[in-house]
Amino acid sequence: MSSPPPGLASRQVAWQVLLAVAAGAYADGALERELGRTPLSPADRALATELAYGAIRQRRLLDAWLDRLGKVPAERQPPKLRWLLHLGLYQLLHSDRIPASAAVSTTVELAKRGGMARLAPVVNGLLRAFLRGQEAQQSLPLPRDPASALAIEQSLPDWLAQLLLQWQTPAAAEAFGRACNTPPSLDLRVNRLRSTASELQAAFAAAGVNLQPIEGLADGLSVQGRCGDLRQLPGYGEGQWCVQDRSAQRVALLLDPKPGERILDACAAPGGKSTHLAELMGDQGQVLALDRGEARLRRVTRNAERLGLRCIEPRHGDAASLLESAPELKGSFDAVLIDAPCSGLGTLARHADARWRIDPAAIAGLVVLQRALLEALLPALKPGGRLVYATCTVHPEENGSLIEAFLADHPELRLQQSWQLWPGELQGAGDGFYAARLQLA
Protein backbone atom coordinates (compact mmCIF):
# COMPACT_ATOMS: atom_id res chain seq x y z
CA MET A 1 0.00 0.00 0.00
CA SER A 2 1.31 3.44 -0.88
CA SER A 3 2.36 5.89 1.80
CA PRO A 4 -0.59 7.71 3.41
CA PRO A 5 -1.44 11.20 2.14
CA PRO A 6 -0.74 14.16 4.46
CA GLY A 7 -3.21 14.52 7.28
CA LEU A 8 -4.59 10.98 6.98
CA ALA A 9 -3.35 9.89 10.41
CA SER A 10 -5.14 12.73 12.20
CA ARG A 11 -8.36 11.92 10.34
CA GLN A 12 -7.95 8.25 11.23
CA VAL A 13 -7.72 9.23 14.90
CA ALA A 14 -10.85 11.37 14.59
CA TRP A 15 -12.76 8.51 12.92
CA GLN A 16 -11.75 6.11 15.68
CA VAL A 17 -12.98 8.60 18.28
CA LEU A 18 -16.36 8.88 16.51
CA LEU A 19 -16.68 5.10 16.47
CA ALA A 20 -15.74 4.84 20.16
CA VAL A 21 -18.22 7.54 21.22
CA ALA A 22 -20.99 5.88 19.21
CA ALA A 23 -20.21 2.68 21.13
CA GLY A 24 -20.58 4.46 24.47
CA ALA A 25 -17.15 5.94 25.25
CA TYR A 26 -16.75 9.52 26.48
CA ALA A 27 -15.30 11.82 23.86
CA ASP A 28 -12.41 13.21 25.91
CA GLY A 29 -11.30 9.76 27.09
CA ALA A 30 -11.59 8.28 23.61
CA LEU A 31 -9.54 11.10 22.11
CA GLU A 32 -6.86 10.79 24.78
CA ARG A 33 -6.56 7.04 24.13
CA GLU A 34 -6.33 7.42 20.36
CA LEU A 35 -3.78 10.23 20.58
CA GLY A 36 -1.75 8.06 22.94
CA ARG A 37 -1.65 5.28 20.34
CA THR A 38 -0.73 7.47 17.38
CA PRO A 39 2.33 9.76 17.32
CA LEU A 40 1.24 13.03 15.73
CA SER A 41 2.75 16.48 15.38
CA PRO A 42 1.14 19.25 17.47
CA ALA A 43 -0.64 20.56 14.37
CA ASP A 44 -2.01 17.10 13.52
CA ARG A 45 -3.10 16.54 17.12
CA ALA A 46 -5.00 19.83 16.95
CA LEU A 47 -6.60 18.77 13.64
CA ALA A 48 -7.67 15.40 15.05
CA THR A 49 -9.20 17.13 18.05
CA GLU A 50 -11.03 19.70 15.94
CA LEU A 51 -12.46 17.08 13.58
CA ALA A 52 -13.49 14.60 16.27
CA TYR A 53 -15.15 17.09 18.59
CA GLY A 54 -16.66 19.09 15.75
CA ALA A 55 -18.27 16.07 14.10
CA ILE A 56 -19.61 14.87 17.46
CA ARG A 57 -21.17 18.26 18.20
CA GLN A 58 -22.70 18.44 14.72
CA ARG A 59 -24.05 14.88 14.71
CA ARG A 60 -27.68 15.91 14.24
CA LEU A 61 -26.97 18.27 11.35
CA LEU A 62 -24.65 15.78 9.65
CA ASP A 63 -27.29 13.06 9.90
CA ALA A 64 -29.78 15.43 8.27
CA TRP A 65 -27.40 15.89 5.34
CA LEU A 66 -26.95 12.11 5.04
CA ASP A 67 -30.73 11.70 4.98
CA ARG A 68 -30.89 14.31 2.24
CA LEU A 69 -28.05 12.97 0.09
CA GLY A 70 -28.02 9.21 0.64
CA LYS A 71 -30.28 6.41 -0.49
CA VAL A 72 -30.27 4.93 3.03
CA PRO A 73 -31.26 7.04 6.09
CA ALA A 74 -28.38 7.89 8.40
CA GLU A 75 -29.58 5.72 11.28
CA ARG A 76 -29.69 2.67 9.00
CA GLN A 77 -26.19 3.19 7.60
CA PRO A 78 -23.47 0.74 8.70
CA PRO A 79 -21.88 2.52 11.71
CA LYS A 80 -18.39 2.65 10.22
CA LEU A 81 -19.73 4.25 7.06
CA ARG A 82 -22.04 6.66 8.91
CA TRP A 83 -19.28 8.09 11.10
CA LEU A 84 -16.79 8.23 8.24
CA LEU A 85 -19.29 10.23 6.19
CA HIS A 86 -19.78 12.50 9.21
CA LEU A 87 -16.04 13.11 9.23
CA GLY A 88 -15.98 14.00 5.54
CA LEU A 89 -19.10 16.15 5.62
CA TYR A 90 -17.93 18.03 8.70
CA GLN A 91 -14.78 19.11 6.88
CA LEU A 92 -16.80 20.31 3.90
CA LEU A 93 -19.31 22.17 6.05
CA HIS A 94 -17.24 23.65 8.83
CA SER A 95 -13.53 23.75 8.10
CA ASP A 96 -12.40 26.72 6.05
CA ARG A 97 -8.75 25.64 6.35
CA ILE A 98 -9.21 22.28 4.59
CA PRO A 99 -9.56 22.27 0.77
CA ALA A 100 -12.62 20.36 -0.40
CA SER A 101 -10.46 18.11 -2.56
CA ALA A 102 -8.38 17.07 0.46
CA ALA A 103 -11.50 16.42 2.56
CA VAL A 104 -12.95 14.13 -0.13
CA SER A 105 -9.75 12.30 -1.06
CA THR A 106 -8.71 11.55 2.52
CA THR A 107 -12.20 10.33 3.44
CA VAL A 108 -12.22 7.99 0.42
CA GLU A 109 -8.73 6.79 1.31
CA LEU A 110 -9.83 6.03 4.88
CA ALA A 111 -12.67 3.91 3.48
CA LYS A 112 -10.19 1.92 1.42
CA ARG A 113 -7.74 1.45 4.29
CA GLY A 114 -10.49 0.79 6.83
CA GLY A 115 -11.88 -2.37 5.24
CA MET A 116 -14.57 -0.59 3.23
CA ALA A 117 -13.00 -0.53 -0.23
CA ARG A 118 -16.33 -1.61 -1.81
CA LEU A 119 -18.00 1.42 -0.27
CA ALA A 120 -15.31 3.92 -1.29
CA PRO A 121 -17.30 4.91 -4.43
CA VAL A 122 -20.35 5.54 -2.22
CA VAL A 123 -18.27 7.84 0.00
CA ASN A 124 -16.85 9.66 -3.02
CA GLY A 125 -20.25 10.02 -4.69
CA LEU A 126 -22.06 11.33 -1.63
CA LEU A 127 -19.41 13.91 -0.76
CA ARG A 128 -19.22 15.12 -4.35
CA ALA A 129 -23.01 15.33 -4.49
CA PHE A 130 -22.83 17.59 -1.45
CA LEU A 131 -20.25 19.80 -3.19
CA ARG A 132 -22.38 20.06 -6.33
CA GLY A 133 -25.30 21.14 -4.18
CA GLN A 134 -23.16 23.76 -2.50
CA GLU A 135 -22.03 25.13 -5.87
CA ALA A 136 -25.69 25.37 -6.88
CA GLN A 137 -26.36 27.14 -3.55
CA GLN A 138 -28.76 24.43 -2.42
CA SER A 139 -29.52 24.52 1.29
CA LEU A 140 -30.78 21.84 3.64
CA PRO A 141 -34.60 21.93 3.83
CA LEU A 142 -35.72 22.47 7.43
CA PRO A 143 -39.00 21.46 9.09
CA ARG A 144 -41.66 24.12 9.57
CA ASP A 145 -41.84 23.45 13.30
CA PRO A 146 -39.49 26.01 14.95
CA ALA A 147 -38.13 23.57 17.55
CA SER A 148 -37.43 20.85 14.97
CA ALA A 149 -35.74 23.37 12.69
CA LEU A 150 -33.60 24.67 15.56
CA ALA A 151 -32.64 21.12 16.56
CA ILE A 152 -31.32 20.35 13.09
CA GLU A 153 -29.75 23.71 12.29
CA GLN A 154 -27.88 23.95 15.61
CA SER A 155 -27.45 20.18 16.07
CA LEU A 156 -29.36 19.82 19.34
CA PRO A 157 -31.60 17.11 20.82
CA ASP A 158 -35.30 17.75 20.23
CA TRP A 159 -36.09 18.12 23.93
CA LEU A 160 -33.42 20.78 24.41
CA ALA A 161 -34.49 22.77 21.34
CA GLN A 162 -38.07 22.77 22.63
CA LEU A 163 -37.00 24.00 26.08
CA LEU A 164 -34.74 26.69 24.67
CA LEU A 165 -37.64 28.21 22.77
CA GLN A 166 -39.66 28.23 26.00
CA TRP A 167 -36.86 29.97 27.91
CA GLN A 168 -35.53 32.33 25.25
CA THR A 169 -36.43 34.26 22.13
CA PRO A 170 -35.74 32.44 18.83
CA ALA A 171 -32.67 34.64 18.26
CA ALA A 172 -31.28 33.89 21.74
CA ALA A 173 -31.97 30.17 21.31
CA GLU A 174 -29.98 30.22 18.06
CA ALA A 175 -27.17 32.08 19.80
CA PHE A 176 -27.10 29.35 22.46
CA GLY A 177 -26.72 26.73 19.74
CA ARG A 178 -23.94 28.61 17.99
CA ALA A 179 -22.04 29.05 21.26
CA CYS A 180 -22.37 25.35 22.04
CA ASN A 181 -20.98 24.49 18.61
CA THR A 182 -17.96 26.78 18.97
CA PRO A 183 -14.76 25.37 20.51
CA PRO A 184 -14.41 26.87 24.00
CA SER A 185 -11.92 29.58 24.79
CA LEU A 186 -8.82 28.69 26.80
CA ASP A 187 -8.92 30.96 29.84
CA LEU A 188 -6.31 31.31 32.56
CA ARG A 189 -6.56 32.63 36.09
CA VAL A 190 -3.51 34.43 37.41
CA ASN A 191 -2.37 33.33 40.87
CA ARG A 192 -2.27 36.81 42.36
CA LEU A 193 0.01 35.57 45.15
CA ARG A 194 2.76 34.71 42.67
CA SER A 195 2.32 36.93 39.61
CA THR A 196 0.24 39.62 37.92
CA ALA A 197 -1.71 39.71 34.68
CA SER A 198 0.76 42.12 33.08
CA GLU A 199 3.77 40.01 34.09
CA LEU A 200 2.20 36.89 32.61
CA GLN A 201 1.26 38.68 29.41
CA ALA A 202 4.87 39.75 28.96
CA ALA A 203 6.25 36.27 29.72
CA PHE A 204 3.81 34.59 27.34
CA ALA A 205 4.51 37.15 24.62
CA ALA A 206 8.22 36.33 24.88
CA ALA A 207 7.25 32.68 24.30
CA GLY A 208 5.18 33.64 21.24
CA VAL A 209 1.75 33.30 22.90
CA ASN A 210 -0.73 36.18 23.02
CA LEU A 211 -2.83 36.65 26.16
CA GLN A 212 -5.76 39.05 26.25
CA PRO A 213 -7.42 40.43 29.40
CA ILE A 214 -10.96 39.27 30.16
CA GLU A 215 -13.26 42.18 30.87
CA GLY A 216 -14.43 42.32 34.48
CA LEU A 217 -11.87 39.78 35.73
CA ALA A 218 -8.69 41.33 37.10
CA ASP A 219 -6.97 37.93 37.19
CA GLY A 220 -8.48 36.54 33.99
CA LEU A 221 -6.55 36.13 30.74
CA SER A 222 -7.56 34.37 27.53
CA VAL A 223 -5.13 32.53 25.26
CA GLN A 224 -5.36 33.62 21.64
CA GLY A 225 -4.58 30.91 19.08
CA ARG A 226 -2.80 27.63 19.69
CA CYS A 227 -0.23 27.28 22.44
CA GLY A 228 0.89 23.64 22.52
CA ASP A 229 1.54 21.79 25.79
CA LEU A 230 0.29 24.01 28.61
CA ARG A 231 2.84 22.59 31.04
CA GLN A 232 5.64 24.03 28.93
CA LEU A 233 4.30 27.58 29.08
CA PRO A 234 5.91 30.26 31.27
CA GLY A 235 4.97 30.17 34.95
CA TYR A 236 3.21 26.80 34.98
CA GLY A 237 5.84 25.02 37.06
CA GLU A 238 6.09 28.05 39.34
CA GLY A 239 2.35 28.00 40.04
CA GLN A 240 1.73 31.45 38.59
CA TRP A 241 -1.52 30.50 36.87
CA CYS A 242 -4.08 27.79 36.29
CA VAL A 243 -6.71 27.05 33.67
CA GLN A 244 -10.24 28.16 34.60
CA ASP A 245 -13.14 29.21 32.40
CA ARG A 246 -14.04 32.89 32.64
CA SER A 247 -17.57 32.17 33.86
CA ALA A 248 -16.33 29.85 36.61
CA GLN A 249 -13.91 32.56 37.79
CA ARG A 250 -16.89 34.70 38.80
CA VAL A 251 -18.15 32.19 41.38
CA ALA A 252 -15.44 32.61 44.03
CA LEU A 253 -15.58 36.37 43.50
CA LEU A 254 -19.29 36.28 44.31
CA LEU A 255 -18.55 34.54 47.63
CA ASP A 256 -16.12 37.41 48.44
CA PRO A 257 -13.84 35.50 50.84
CA LYS A 258 -11.75 37.43 53.37
CA PRO A 259 -8.34 36.61 54.90
CA GLY A 260 -8.71 34.57 58.07
CA GLU A 261 -12.16 33.20 57.27
CA ARG A 262 -13.15 29.55 57.44
CA ILE A 263 -14.80 28.45 54.20
CA LEU A 264 -16.34 25.15 53.09
CA ASP A 265 -16.12 24.20 49.41
CA ALA A 266 -18.63 21.37 49.49
CA CYS A 267 -18.08 19.82 46.02
CA ALA A 268 -14.48 20.82 45.56
CA ALA A 269 -12.78 18.58 42.99
CA PRO A 270 -10.81 19.21 40.86
CA GLY A 271 -10.05 22.33 42.88
CA GLY A 272 -10.43 25.34 40.60
CA LYS A 273 -12.74 27.20 42.97
CA SER A 274 -10.98 26.02 46.17
CA THR A 275 -7.67 27.39 44.93
CA HIS A 276 -9.33 30.61 43.76
CA LEU A 277 -10.86 31.10 47.21
CA ALA A 278 -7.46 30.54 48.82
CA GLU A 279 -5.81 33.08 46.52
CA LEU A 280 -8.49 35.68 47.21
CA MET A 281 -7.95 35.11 50.95
CA GLY A 282 -4.23 35.68 50.62
CA ASP A 283 -3.76 32.03 51.70
CA GLN A 284 -4.82 33.09 55.22
CA GLY A 285 -7.59 31.17 56.94
CA GLN A 286 -8.96 27.75 55.97
CA VAL A 287 -10.67 26.31 52.90
CA LEU A 288 -12.10 22.88 53.72
CA ALA A 289 -12.21 21.22 50.28
CA LEU A 290 -14.71 18.39 50.48
CA ASP A 291 -15.38 15.79 47.80
CA ARG A 292 -16.61 12.22 47.83
CA GLY A 293 -14.32 11.10 44.99
CA GLU A 294 -10.91 10.15 46.40
CA ALA A 295 -9.12 10.19 43.04
CA ARG A 296 -10.64 13.58 42.19
CA LEU A 297 -9.72 14.89 45.63
CA ARG A 298 -6.08 14.06 44.96
CA ARG A 299 -6.28 16.52 42.06
CA VAL A 300 -7.27 19.23 44.54
CA THR A 301 -4.13 18.45 46.54
CA ARG A 302 -1.88 18.50 43.47
CA ASN A 303 -3.36 21.76 42.20
CA ALA A 304 -2.98 23.42 45.60
CA GLU A 305 0.64 22.27 45.90
CA ARG A 306 1.58 23.57 42.45
CA LEU A 307 0.00 26.94 43.22
CA GLY A 308 1.76 27.09 46.59
CA LEU A 309 -1.45 27.28 48.66
CA ARG A 310 -1.32 26.00 52.23
CA CYS A 311 -4.70 26.98 53.63
CA ILE A 312 -6.61 24.30 51.69
CA GLU A 313 -7.52 21.19 53.68
CA PRO A 314 -8.79 18.40 51.41
CA ARG A 315 -11.30 16.06 53.06
CA HIS A 316 -12.94 12.94 51.69
CA GLY A 317 -16.64 12.80 52.38
CA ASP A 318 -20.20 13.27 51.17
CA ALA A 319 -21.43 16.85 51.49
CA ALA A 320 -25.03 15.70 52.04
CA SER A 321 -24.06 13.87 55.25
CA LEU A 322 -21.11 15.99 56.38
CA LEU A 323 -22.74 17.39 59.51
CA GLU A 324 -24.05 13.97 60.52
CA SER A 325 -20.54 12.53 60.50
CA ALA A 326 -18.88 15.70 61.84
CA PRO A 327 -21.46 17.52 64.03
CA GLU A 328 -18.71 19.73 65.45
CA LEU A 329 -18.69 21.59 62.11
CA LYS A 330 -22.21 22.97 62.62
CA GLY A 331 -22.21 26.74 62.71
CA SER A 332 -18.45 26.90 62.15
CA PHE A 333 -18.07 28.38 58.65
CA ASP A 334 -18.06 32.01 57.59
CA ALA A 335 -19.06 30.96 54.10
CA VAL A 336 -20.10 27.85 52.17
CA LEU A 337 -19.75 27.23 48.44
CA ILE A 338 -21.98 24.59 46.85
CA ASP A 339 -20.87 24.05 43.26
CA ALA A 340 -23.64 21.52 42.81
CA PRO A 341 -23.84 18.49 40.53
CA CYS A 342 -26.05 19.51 37.62
CA SER A 343 -27.12 18.72 34.07
CA GLY A 344 -24.16 20.68 32.64
CA LEU A 345 -26.21 22.38 29.92
CA GLY A 346 -23.87 25.36 30.09
CA THR A 347 -20.83 23.30 29.07
CA LEU A 348 -21.97 21.66 25.84
CA ALA A 349 -19.17 23.33 23.85
CA ARG A 350 -16.58 21.98 26.29
CA HIS A 351 -18.02 18.45 26.40
CA ALA A 352 -18.71 17.58 22.78
CA ASP A 353 -20.84 14.47 23.45
CA ALA A 354 -22.76 15.78 26.48
CA ARG A 355 -25.83 16.92 24.54
CA TRP A 356 -26.35 13.34 23.30
CA ARG A 357 -25.90 11.85 26.78
CA ILE A 358 -28.06 14.08 28.98
CA ASP A 359 -31.37 12.46 29.90
CA PRO A 360 -33.97 15.20 30.47
CA ALA A 361 -35.88 12.83 32.76
CA ALA A 362 -32.87 12.77 35.12
CA ILE A 363 -33.04 16.51 35.82
CA ALA A 364 -35.81 16.10 38.39
CA GLY A 365 -33.52 13.81 40.38
CA LEU A 366 -30.72 16.36 40.18
CA VAL A 367 -33.04 19.02 41.58
CA VAL A 368 -33.79 16.76 44.56
CA LEU A 369 -30.05 16.29 45.16
CA GLN A 370 -29.33 20.02 44.80
CA ARG A 371 -32.05 20.91 47.31
CA ALA A 372 -30.77 18.21 49.69
CA LEU A 373 -27.27 19.74 49.57
CA LEU A 374 -28.65 23.19 50.38
CA GLU A 375 -30.66 21.85 53.32
CA ALA A 376 -27.79 19.73 54.64
CA LEU A 377 -25.17 22.49 54.52
CA LEU A 378 -27.15 25.52 55.62
CA PRO A 379 -26.58 24.58 59.31
CA ALA A 380 -22.82 24.74 58.70
CA LEU A 381 -22.98 28.55 58.50
CA LYS A 382 -22.21 30.90 61.36
CA PRO A 383 -24.82 33.61 62.07
CA GLY A 384 -24.44 36.19 59.31
CA GLY A 385 -22.62 33.67 57.13
CA ARG A 386 -22.75 33.56 53.32
CA LEU A 387 -23.74 30.71 51.04
CA VAL A 388 -23.10 30.64 47.30
CA TYR A 389 -24.95 28.08 45.23
CA ALA A 390 -23.60 27.58 41.70
CA THR A 391 -24.19 25.33 38.70
CA CYS A 392 -22.85 25.10 35.16
CA THR A 393 -26.31 24.78 33.64
CA VAL A 394 -29.01 27.06 32.25
CA HIS A 395 -32.01 24.98 33.31
CA PRO A 396 -34.23 27.21 35.51
CA GLU A 397 -35.45 24.28 37.61
CA GLU A 398 -31.86 23.73 38.76
CA ASN A 399 -31.20 27.42 39.22
CA GLY A 400 -33.54 30.32 39.87
CA SER A 401 -36.64 28.22 40.55
CA LEU A 402 -34.73 26.06 43.02
CA ILE A 403 -33.33 29.03 44.93
CA GLU A 404 -36.73 30.75 44.96
CA ALA A 405 -38.32 27.67 46.56
CA PHE A 406 -35.43 27.31 49.04
CA LEU A 407 -35.74 30.92 50.13
CA ALA A 408 -39.51 30.57 50.57
CA ASP A 409 -38.87 27.80 53.11
CA HIS A 410 -36.06 29.67 54.89
CA PRO A 411 -37.10 33.20 55.88
CA GLU A 412 -33.85 33.49 57.84
CA LEU A 413 -32.03 33.77 54.50
CA ARG A 414 -31.73 36.80 52.24
CA LEU A 415 -30.81 36.75 48.56
CA GLN A 416 -27.96 39.22 48.09
CA GLN A 417 -27.14 38.67 44.43
CA SER A 418 -27.68 36.19 41.61
CA TRP A 419 -26.79 35.89 37.97
CA GLN A 420 -27.35 33.58 35.04
CA LEU A 421 -24.77 33.55 32.26
CA TRP A 422 -25.58 31.89 28.95
CA PRO A 423 -22.82 30.25 26.89
CA GLY A 424 -20.77 32.82 25.06
CA GLU A 425 -22.18 35.78 26.97
CA LEU A 426 -18.87 37.04 28.42
CA GLN A 427 -16.91 38.62 25.56
CA GLY A 428 -18.42 36.03 23.22
CA ALA A 429 -16.97 33.09 25.16
CA GLY A 430 -17.34 31.26 28.46
CA ASP A 431 -19.54 28.48 29.80
CA GLY A 432 -23.12 28.90 30.90
CA PHE A 433 -23.27 29.36 34.69
CA TYR A 434 -25.70 30.28 37.44
CA ALA A 435 -24.77 31.54 40.89
CA ALA A 436 -26.69 32.99 43.83
CA ARG A 437 -25.33 34.41 47.11
CA LEU A 438 -27.52 34.03 50.18
CA GLN A 439 -26.87 35.49 53.62
CA LEU A 440 -27.99 34.04 56.93
CA ALA A 441 -29.50 36.44 59.44
Image: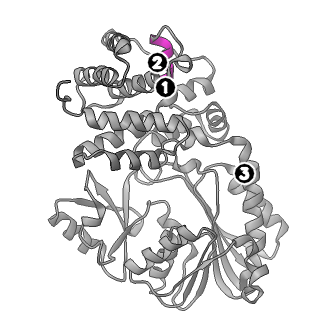
Q: Are marks 2 and 3 in contact (CB under 8 Å)?
A: no
Q: Is residue 322 left or right of residue 313?
A: right
Q: Are marks 1 and 2 in contact (CB under 8 Å)?
A: yes
Residue 52 visible from this viewpoint: yes
Question: How far apart are labels 2 and 3 at the CA level?
Answer: 34 Å
Report which quarter residue 209 is drawn in. bottom left
Residue segment shown in magenta: 62-69
- Residue closer to the observer: 349 or 397: 349
| Helix, strand or loop at mark 1 | helix
Is residue 44 shown above or below 418? above
Residue type at tag 2: Trp
Residue 161, percent from left and from top: 61, 33
> Residue 405, located in which quarter of the rendered image?
bottom right
Residue 227 falls left or right of residue 93: left
Question: What crowding class fits label 2: few (fewer than 14 Cα within 10 Å), some (14-19), or many (20 or more)?
Answer: many
Count of marks overlaid on the render: 3
Image x and y of residue 15, in percent: 39, 33
Q: Which residue is mark 1?
A: 61
Locate residue 390, reporting x and y percent: 61, 63
Residue displayed at 27% across by 25% down: 106
Question: Which amino acid type corresponds to the residue marked 3 in the rendered image?
Answer: Glu
67 within the magenta span = yes
Q: Quadrant of the C terminus?
A: bottom right
